[in-house]
């Protein structure tokens, strides 16, 4: 099952997703759908926008839930979504954490996975560049392991940013400006 926009939003309430994470998820959805619409327009490939939208809206659904032993983000959310029959969405979400790009077994490979991953890395509480997002992470107090992940992931994330932006014929700065001007409608469509 792939939830509609309204069904995905109702899951926020069910799982008590904090307001700041709701805003983040909405912005990730807006950017992911923007990328998808431009890619479909430029290179005419099929992207499951219903799956992409649901995954973007639900990618942080586990942020206010106690994980089971051994679970990390997004494992808890992936498990919960699979338990309610949302396997397609869960499988896309599984590939969105930063460390996933370093692991060939879970690195984003489909368009839906790549667009969710990149949209998440270009969003904090507004749409920003990959460079700006990494700068925010580096400003945090991080463990040596976290710094190592950032250092290893950065060139791969930049390569994905360049790949997607080249595919749509826009710079990251142009993407940011155009997305800030767009509106996400009440049914999850870009207006």
Image (cartoon, grey):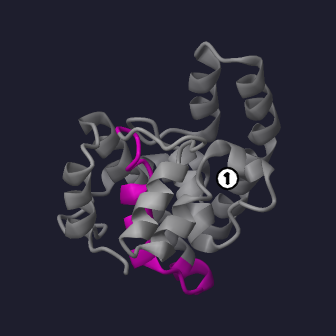
The residue stretch that appears in magenta: 40-64
Q: Residue at x 61, y 52 (%)?
A: 171
Q: Residue at x 32, y 57 (%)?
A: 182
Q: Is residue 167 above or below residue 159?
A: below
Q: Judge by depth and name the residue closer to the eye, 52 or 177.
A: 52
Report the quarter where the C terminus lies: bottom left
In the rendered image, residue 51 lying in the magenta stretch gets the answer: yes
Q: Judge by depth and name the residue closer to the eye, 29 or 11.
A: 11
Q: Residue furthest top?
A: 141
Residue 186 screen position, x and y as percent: 17, 64
Check disc 1 and report its element: helix, strand or loop.
helix
Q: Which residue is mark 1?
A: 161
Q: Is residue 94 above or below residue 53?
A: above
Q: Residue at x 74, y 24 (%)?
A: 147
Evaluate whether residue 52 shows in this view. no
Q: Residue at x 32, y 52 (%)?
A: 26
In the rendered image, residue 24 lying in the magenta stretch gets the answer: no
Q: Residues within 10 Å of mark 1 (few under 14, many from 20)?
A: many
Q: Is residue 16 above or below residue 31?
A: above
């Amino acid at each position: 099952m792939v939830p509609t926009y309204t069904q995905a939003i109702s899951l926020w309430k069910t799982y008590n997703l904090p307001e700041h994470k709701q805003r983040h998820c909405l912005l990730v959805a807006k950017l992911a759908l923007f990328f998808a619409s431009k890619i479909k327009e430029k290179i005419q490939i099929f992207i499951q926008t219903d799956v992409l939208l649901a995954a973007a809206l639900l990618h942080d659904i586990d942020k206010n839930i106690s994980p089971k032993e051994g679970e990390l983000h997004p494992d808890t959310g992936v498990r919960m979504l699979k338990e309610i029959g949302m396997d397609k969405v869960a499988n896309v979400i599984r590939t969105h954490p930063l460390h996933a790009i370093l692991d060939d077994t879970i690195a984003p490979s489909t368009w839906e996975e790549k667009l969710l991953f990149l949209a998440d890395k270009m969003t904090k509480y507004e749409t920003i560049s990959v460079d700006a997002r990494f700068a925010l992470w580096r400003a945090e107090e991080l463990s040596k392991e976290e710094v190592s992940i950032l250092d290893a992931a950065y060139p791969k994330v930049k390569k994905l940013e360049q790949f997607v932006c080249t595919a749509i014929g826009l710079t990251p700065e142009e993407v940011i400006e155009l997305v800030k001007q767009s509106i996400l409608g009440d049914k999850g469509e870009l207006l």
